Amino acid sequence: MKILITGSHGQLGTELLRQLKEGRSEIGPIPEKLCTAKVIPTDADELDITDRDEVVAFVRRMEPDVIINCAAYTNVDGCESHTEDAFKVNALGPRNLAIAAQKVGAKLVHVSTDYVFSGKENGGVPLDESALPAPVSAYGRTKLLGEQYVRQFCPRSFVVRTAWLYSHTGKNFVFTMVNAGRKLGALTVVNDQLGNPTNAADLAHHLLNLAVSSEYGTYHCTGEGVCSWYDFACEIIRLAGVKATVAPCTSAEYAAAHPDAASRPAWSALENRMLACTVGNEMRPWQEALTEFFKNESPEA
């Protein structure tokens, strides 16, 4: 079995490579047939997913059984000022991979985001896969189009939406809070945007379970439980043992201080209903996954 991973240098790609090498995740063993799989890691310097001809030629040459697309233009604010770049990576890239996957009969696992939703409060109920997308940012709009292209051009596909992702590598909210706490000693974080913190170890584990299944469709895959960014930051600072205070603020107050920032969803809590109904939902409560994160490796400045 061959697995092609795009965006292999990022948070999720790095975690996927680790699990495929070790044969297990923090949750448990990965599917047995993946333990002997040939892994083809790529990043932007090896494969330009925005170039259709290059993607098709590369995939035909490698003949993977599964493609896992972790590549994305994830700078939410940058997407507003670099819309064309975001469009190419987040929309055309998945389209090209879907076309190539279909040509060689490969499955495609495509990672998407909670930003495809409007962020409007849903009566305190997390959004399941039946909720209608309505993005309010360039990032969300380009990611939604990428989802649509994947479904259109590769029926044997999984569109997996996640949120508030963190890992031991790359830039993420956990590292940002720890480093800022150490440097500043006082943090101010919004308390009226709610969602699901997600450990990359949990997400990667479920992506691999999906990759060996035929349960095609749209999935939500986030940590269990809902919190605000303020709640998340408080728990990060506590577990990291950083001597810093964390104060809450509203989104309006944050926007006034950062006028160029893109709109963020106020309510982006997701429900992992499809996982529970198909391959199984083993996503850990977000507090448990975060605690395990700090046990395994403290983030470095």
Image: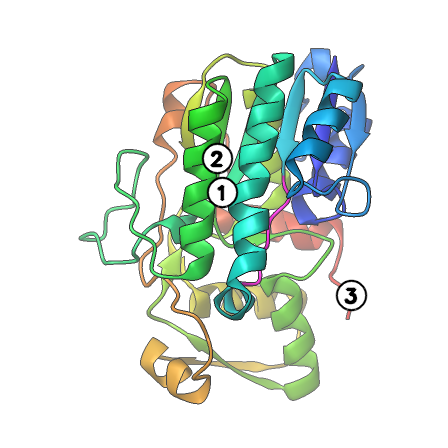
Question: Which is more toward the observer, 297 or 177?
Answer: 177
Q: Tell me which label, 2 or 3, sits earlier in the chain.
A: 2
- Which of discs 1 and 3 lies nearer the camera? The answer is 1
Q: Is residue 93 left or right of residue 8?
A: left
Q: Residue at x 66, y 43 (%)?
A: 12
Q: Residue at x 36, y 20 (%)?
A: 277
Task: Judge whether 140 appears above or below 202 on screen.
Answer: below
Residue 132 lies, in percent from the top left, at 26, 42
SS at mark 2 in the image: strand
Q: Separation of disc 1 and disc 3 at Cα?
A: 27 Å
Name the residue tied to disc 2. 160
Name the residue tied to disc 3. 300
Residue 219 lies, in percent from the top left, at 42, 31
Q: Is residue 271 left or right of residue 12?
A: left
| Label 2 crowd (10 A; few <14 / some 14-19 / many >=20) | many
Q: Separation of disc 2 and disc 3 at Cα?
A: 29 Å
Looking at the rendering, the stretch of residues picked out in magenta corresponds to 70-75
The three-letter code of the residue at mark 2 reads: Val
| Label 1 crowd (10 A; few <14 / some 14-19 / many >=20) | many
Is residue 242 visible in this depiction of the protein? yes
